[in-house]
């Protein structure tokens, strides 16, 4: 008499996992061999569990043939260290005024503790990450950032001195190309180097956008602490053309800290990046959900259409 084997029905969770994997396959094929520049920073870096999820997702991208380049920030961590050392700093239009003493702390935190934490997390998840500063090999050549502000009373524009705050003048991609053809994941601290070897504090969004454009990346992914671009009713906008994005900037729908992020994305797609994404980095596995599912979970800004 033959034995009857009772098979358990797969759970709903298992079925959903299989469906997600099946849905991801075409995207894995499409992006194999391409470069993603991922900006990771700020409050998205705040929790250990979120950091481990991020590291695991980056390792997965590399293992399926995508070349991730991580550019990280660290504003809250810099602020905490400055407070601990009782060094006072000011902000102008969202940018930290950076004198020489502050620059020393910024470089120590970004190129030191934060960079190595991310490298270690990726390595612990089975990847091979290498930490870099923008000063290494002159990866990010920089110039002093010039900003003008109009005085409300006199209506006269005044040039602001932000100290050692810089902007990229050149990205030396030859430093990164060997990593892209290997199993190494570069993790970059946004410190630039000036003509005289001086260090410059560069906004991580700006650095990531410049690196993505220089590499001709398929995607620039900005991981932040909001869901993405919201409309006037606070609903998430899944996809934006550059024209739509400029309208939202013009009518005030995009405001506050989202303005420079959207502008950075627009600059990147204008300069040849395939698409730019703004995601909530606090959401588990948000990077995979946005890239490998049909509908995504954040906002994607597409390249302008050519005639």
Image (cartoon, helix red, strand yellow):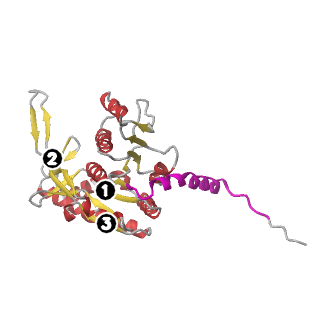
Q: Which residues are magenta?
A: 6-35
Q: Residue 168: where, in percent of width, then height?
A: 20, 51
Q: Nearer the viewer, residue 46 or 185?
A: 185
145 vs 16, left or right, is: left
Q: Identify the residue under disc 1.
A: 72
Query: Which residue is painted at 76% across and 63% down in the image?
Result: 7
Q: Position of residue 291 (x, y in %)?
A: 46, 50
Residue extending farthest bottom: 1
Dot 1: element: strand
The nearer-to-camera label among 3 and 1 is: 3
For the residue pair 125 and 92, the one nearer the viewer reads as 125
Mark seen at residue 145: 2
Magenta-colored stretch includes residue 18: yes
Q: CA distance from mark 2 to mark 3?
A: 30 Å
Which is nearer the N-term, disc 2 or disc 3? 2
Report x, y in % for residue 225.
38, 47
Quadrant of residue 137 within the rendered picture:
bottom left
Q: Which residue is mark 3?
A: 178
Choose the circle earlier in sequence order: 2 or 1. 1
Outermost residue on the right side: it is 1
Crowd around label 1: few <14 · some 14–19 · many ≥20 (10 Å)? many
Position of the N terminus, as image quadrant, is bottom right
């Amino acid at each position: 008499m033959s034995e009857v084997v009772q098979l358990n029905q797969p759970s709903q969770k298992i079925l959903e996992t299989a469906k997600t994997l099946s849905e991801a396959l075409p995207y894995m094929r499409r992006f194999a061999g391409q470069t993603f520049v991922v900006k990771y920073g700020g409050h998205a870096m705040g929790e250990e569990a979120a950091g481990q999820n991020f590291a695991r997702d980056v390792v997965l991208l590399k293992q399926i043939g995508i070349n991730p380049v991580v550019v990280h920030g660290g504003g809250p961590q810099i602020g905490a260290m400055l407070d601990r050392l009782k060094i006072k700093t000011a902000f102008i239009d969202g940018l930290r005024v950076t004198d020489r003493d502050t620059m020393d702390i910024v470089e120590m935190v970004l190129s030191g503790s934060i960079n190595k934490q991310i490298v270690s997390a990726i390595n612990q998840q089975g990847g091979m990450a290498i930490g870099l500063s923008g000063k290494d090999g002159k990866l990010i050549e920089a110039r002093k950032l010039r900003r003008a502000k109009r005085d409300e009373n006199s209506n006269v524009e005044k040039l602001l001195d932000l100290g050692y705050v810089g902007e990229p003048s050149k990205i030396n991609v030859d430093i990164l190309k060997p990593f892209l053809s290997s199993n190494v994941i570069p993790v970059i601290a946004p410190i630039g180097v000036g003509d005289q070897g001086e260090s410059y504090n560069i906004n991580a969004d700006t650095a990531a956008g410049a690196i993505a454009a220089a590499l001709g990346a398929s995607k620039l992914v900005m991981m932040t602490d909001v869901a993405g671009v919201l409309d006037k009713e606070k609903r998430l906008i899944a996809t934006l053309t550059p024209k739509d994005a400029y309208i939202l900037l013009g009518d005030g729908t995009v405001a506050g800290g989202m303005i420079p992020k959207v502008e950075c994305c627009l600059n990147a797609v204008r300069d040849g990046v395939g698409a730019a994404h703004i995601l909530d980095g606090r959401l588990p596995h948000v990077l995979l959900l946005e890239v490998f599912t049909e509908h995504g979970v954040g906002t994607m800004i597409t390249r302008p259409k050519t005639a």
